[in-house]
């Protein structure tokens, strides 16, 4: 039994529902290119970098673009995405997310963000929660995308906590795989059938038991 010392949070789909904005912006791009893709396909884009997402989408549409055109399309998608992000307020933090992160900190559990998004800092700023994370590892700081564990291992390193004492919260299949590959516990946020590799799956951070007052040894994450 290990005592959990750190919690590492994905951003999109865990702390805030930007996953919906990503989907809308990609869908708009696909529609302009003359095709569509479903929400089931969208699951494969969660946790995946901007460039790789575009390549997958172009593949689904059977479309070939040069590297320069791809760059332009990714920029266009990001512009539409950021239009939605810029409208965001702290009210859009997902239920229980802020309270859960605060409860961890109050129990002396370190907190980090581990996100593929290059827009993480802007989003945290919009939500006014940047100060709740002891370390922030985003898409600008990693060279290998999830399911590679780099983003979470860097988070653990910056927190100075061994991976086996870390719990990762993720809504993406690739993110759950990354946490497990890094030797961490993975809590899936979403559908248990989709996130079946996670150690435990809940619908949101509002459903995760807070660290018990008597000591983290009794916490559910020390028993899975
Ligand atoms: C991940 C999202 O968090 O970040 C993906 O789940 C997204 O959908 C990726 O593509 C990169 O985000 P951004 O903001 O850098 O385009
Ligand atoms: Mg996510």
Image (cartoon, grey):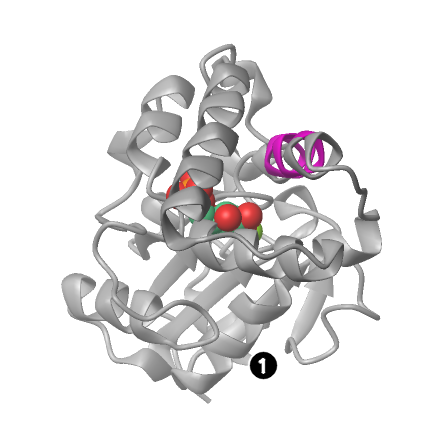
Residue under the image location 52 percent in, 26 percent down:
81
The foreground one among 3 and 46 is 46
Residue 123, position as x, y percentages in the image:
39, 28
Vertical comparison of 63 with 92: above or below: below
In which quadrant will I find the C terminus? bottom right
Q: Position of residue 14 (x, y in %)?
A: 57, 46
Residue 136 at what x, y percent from top left?
Answer: 25, 48
For label 1, the crowd category at 10 Å Cα-Cα, with few meaning under 14, some 14 to 19 and many 20 or more, is: few
Instruction: Kindly identify the residue that appears in the image at 67 percent across and 80 percent down.
Output: 197
Q: Nearer the viewer, residue 221 or 18?
A: 18
Q: Residue at x 80, y 48 (%)?
A: 37
The reply to whether the magenta stretch includes residue 22 is yes
> Range of the magenta residues?
20-28
Query: Where is residue 57, by image quadrant?
Result: bottom right
Above or below residue 191? Residue 157 is below
Q: Is there any visible trace of residue 80 in the rendered image?
A: yes
Q: Relative to 25, is 98 on the left or the right?
A: left
- The residue beneath circle 1 is 223
Q: Quadrant of residue 24?
A: top right
User: What is the chief secondary structure element of the magenta stretch?
Assistant: helix
Mark 1 element type:
loop
């Amino acid at each position: 039994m290990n005592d959990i010392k750190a919690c590492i949070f994905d951003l999109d789909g865990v702390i805030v529902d930007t996953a919906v904005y990503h989907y809308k912006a990609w869908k708009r791009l696909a529609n302009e290119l003359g095709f569509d893709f479903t929400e089931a396909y969208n699951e494969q884009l969660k946790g995946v970098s901007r460039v790789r997402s575009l390549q997958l989408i172009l593949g689904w549409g059977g479309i070939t673009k040069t590297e320069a055109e791809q760059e332009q399309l990714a920029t266009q998608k990001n512009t539409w995405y950021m239009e939605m992000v810029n409208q965001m307020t702290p009210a859009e933090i997902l239920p229980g997310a802020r309270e859960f992160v605060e409860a961890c900190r109050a129990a002396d559990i370190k907190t980090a963000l581990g996100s593929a998004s290059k827009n993480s800092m802007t989003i945290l700023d919009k939500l006014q929660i940047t100060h709740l994370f002891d370390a922030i590892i985003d898409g600008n700081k990693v060279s290998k995308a999830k399911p590679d564990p780099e983003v979470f291992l860097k988070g653990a390193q910056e927190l100075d906590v061994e991976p086996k004492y870390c719990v990762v919260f993720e809504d993406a299949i690739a993110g759950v795989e990354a946490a497990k590959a890094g030797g961490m516990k993975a809590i899936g946020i979403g559908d248990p059938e989709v996130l079946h590799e996670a150690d435990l799956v809940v619908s949101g951070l509002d459903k995760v038991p807070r660290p018990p007052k008597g000591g983290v040894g009794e916490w559910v994450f020390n028993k899975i």
